[in-house]
Image (tube, rainbow, N blue to C red):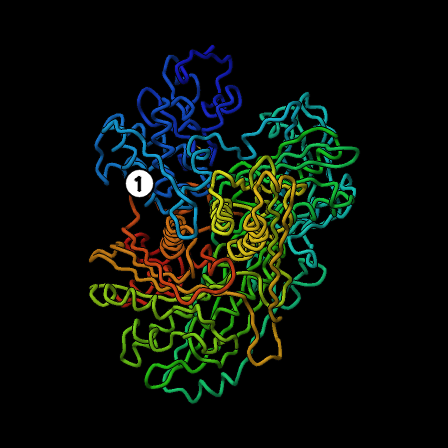
Amino acid sequence: MYTLTVNGKSVSCGENKKLLQFLRDDLRLSATKDGCGQGACGACTVIVDGKATRACVFTLEKLQGKTVTTVEGLSPREKEVFAFAFAETGAVQCGFCIPGMVMSAKALIDQTPEPTAADIKKALRGNICRCTGYVKIEEAVALAARLMKSGEAVPQRECAGLIGDDFHRVDAAAKTLGTGRYVDDIVVPGMLHASALRSAHPRAKVLSIDVAEALKHPDCVAVLTAKDVPGNIKIGHLEFVSDYDVMIAEGGITRFVGDALALAVSRTKESLDAIKALIRVDYEVLEPMTSPAMSLAPGAPKIHEKGNILSHEHLVRGNAAETLKNSKHVVSKKYSLPFTEHAFMEPECAIGMPEGEDGVLLYTGGQSIYDEQREVSRMLGIAPEKVHVQGQLVGGGFGGKEDMSVQHHAALAAWVLKKPVKVLFTRQESLMIHPKRHAMELEFTTGCDENGILTALKAVIVSDTGAYASLGGPVLQRACTHASGPYNYQVIDIEGTAVYTNNPPAGAFRGFGVSQSAVAMEGNLNLLAEKVGISPWEIRRRNAILPGQVLPNGQIADDSTALVACLDAVREQYENAKIAGIASFIKNSGLGVGVPDIGRCIVSVEGGKAHVRTSAACIGQGMATVTTQIACETTGLPPSLIVAEPPDTKRTPNSGTTTASRQTVFTGEATRLAAAQLRKELDAGKTLADLEGREFSAEYFPKTDKMGSDKPNPVSHVAYGYAAVVAILNDDGSLQKIIAAYDLGKVINPKSAEGQIEGGIVMAMGYALTEDYPLEGGYPKANYGTLGLFRATEVPPMEIIMVQGKPNPEAYGAKGVGELATIPAAPAIAGAYYKFDGEFRTKFPMENTFYRKKKK
Ligand code: FES
Ligand code: FES
């Protein structure tokens, strides 16, 4: 028996287990999060005898007689201070890291009541945050320390919640104190646990699957295989390219090591591995194709029936070959960019439960409840209305939670067994299975005249889309449509091919193909500037698109376009720096190119309050706060009378996926339109009590022109954001400072937008300098600790500048920030390193830098 004190109470356990499991599973103290289970992320930080400690590392035998404090055990004063400090500074996004941050902060403040900035960074060194870039978390800790030391009362913030206010996020307190629920925090009575057996080989014929021994395990409830799937065995995020097997059947050929072969269902999660080990699979091992070159080689076996090419794009305007031939200066370079892992903090989890006669209720943490409903209903062969999906808090997504990962398996097991079933990925499963940022090979040839005015671009892009389609087609498309950058020239020849391989699938990742194109376009631009004899800033300024000019894709830049203001805002610091790089870029808001894309919202009056109902998933960006502020601005009601409801297919209308930096514009505008109807009634003298039970619905469905439109100036996207970023290096090559100017249109919540940009920049620093997702023969080799994620101590100061042109009419003039945040900093850092040592690096993560030595 092991006895210890947890949050002031003596508790015992007969089994020697990890402290984290004891806290979460036995004591139901779910504020302490399980981000990796490998001692690498800090989400599980608690205080043991006064010291910040990772609860996933220590077992109970090492903690005998010790005193453990979790967020739940903070004093009321501490809870009040931390909740205020994290909300006030805008430090909370997805929130999954925050309780761990709070405990590291408490351990510091208890020992050092007046910590310096360096003390704070050091104290947070063991805690990864993938969303914020740490800046605002450090500010929160400093503020909490000040309040604790002074003993002053926590200020009461009165805020009307209008557009442009630094309104406290509506979810900040629940996420800080760990009372908000992520799926794995939920325990349903009688719940079973399921986990899939994955293929032992990237490519192999499955000769037989024998589950007889597994079924004899005392905890085993069932082992499901492809034969148990009642409906469509193929799922896929895009309905028209559903190519992903729910499970590979006997006789089928696997496509990557994450392919599921059988789904073990157990009474306890601890016995899942033992049950899976008893499933016998006989394979005929086949040689995997682990690069696009192998997949495209003559005679290569087909990964999918239709062949090894997922999609092909060819964008032509003018005659690029001819124009380049006649250009004064031309540069041509090949770039090689790796797969990257999202590394969101919360591993995927879903719970399926029977509902009604033959329906299923699903708790999920994905990026769209309606995508999940559609895919699960097809798999089960039942009407979509029978699949009821409720979105819980999402601990980060960045595009990596758009596809099915756990949801379909939880729903299948629940539906077959008529029991609640939880599927939770281990961190290693998460690393292996969800689609990555595409590895791409890019060859860019760019020309300009004697003054540095761009003339033409010829680009060839090949992406490794891995085993399944996911969003590989649209990602390639965005890589191509944005390859030419935010510049005023119109001659392009851009060809892209997405190729299936036996690597893990690649799909959506913040930046959506544009992160890759930007590296190539901006790299070439620096070389052209050199040839012309002007600075990298000057060449961008000379070519920067202005309102009314025509973008390389033919679209006329609208009046909101403020790229020049971005460049002007960073000029002085760029020019005064000894070693600096610069990049500017562009990113769309919304799916665009003629794809139906609709934002929807219902505002209903219930219990004397205005309920804002949309299915837009908050993956950390603060969707509920955005819709609350838009509703306050439009109706004139205070935030206390607005309730932003979580996604639920029975309550909230389909507002599309959280993707393509679209929700603030699309759902934001739908919210404005619905709220305006309520405002009209209020202006007519009605009160909320008079309007009880009324519903006001709206949708925002802007039309865009399809790819290849024959219009001279097609509207490809409803809005574009622009940015210019400067990276300054110290003499030793370390980052000294990042200055980032962003044109996001009208900013709804400045602190939130700033926090997203800071987080995006740190993600881009990782892309350029440290992050890697190595594969050997199709097998992923990374764990969370080796991904190369930046820590608080390594992040340089960042200065974020917001600029704005004439606002667009939609959503009060807001434009998306999510993806643009992470695009220009990486090429800016590459440019800085070129200035630093004259070595023009074309491969990420860059080698021979302060952060990464040259590989032998
Ligand atoms: S869960 Fe313990 S360090 Fe990640
Ligand atoms: S807020 Fe830190 S990981 Fe999301």
**Image label count:** 1
Q: Amino acid at mark 1?
A: Glu
- Position of residue 762 relative to residue 305, above or below, is above
- Position of residue 675 relative to residue 519, above or below, is above
Residue at image coords 74%, 47%: 378
Mark 1: give few (<14), some (14-19) or many (20+) Cα within 10 Å. Answer: many
Query: Which residue appears farthest toward the front when viewing the image?
Result: 685
In this rendered view, identify the residue nearer to me: 675 or 447: 675
Q: Ligand 1 appears in which quadrant?
A: top left
In this rendered view, identify the residue nearer to me: 599 or 114: 599
Q: Quadrant of the C terminus?
A: bottom left
Query: Which residue appears farthest toward the bottom when viewing the image?
Result: 326
Q: Which residue is mark 1?
A: 138
Q: Quarter-wise, where is residue 216 in the image?
A: top right
In this rendered view, identify the residue nearer to me: 111 or 732: 111
Asked whether, in this view, residue 49 is left or right of residue 783, the answer is left
Asked whether, in this view, residue 807 is left or right of residue 450, the answer is right
Residue 14 visible in image = yes
Q: Quarter-wise, where is residue 192 in the image?
A: top right
Asked whether, in this view, residue 301 is left or right of residue 576, the answer is right
- Position of residue 682 relative to residue 564, above or below, is above
Where is residue 72 shown, x and y percent of the image?
43, 24
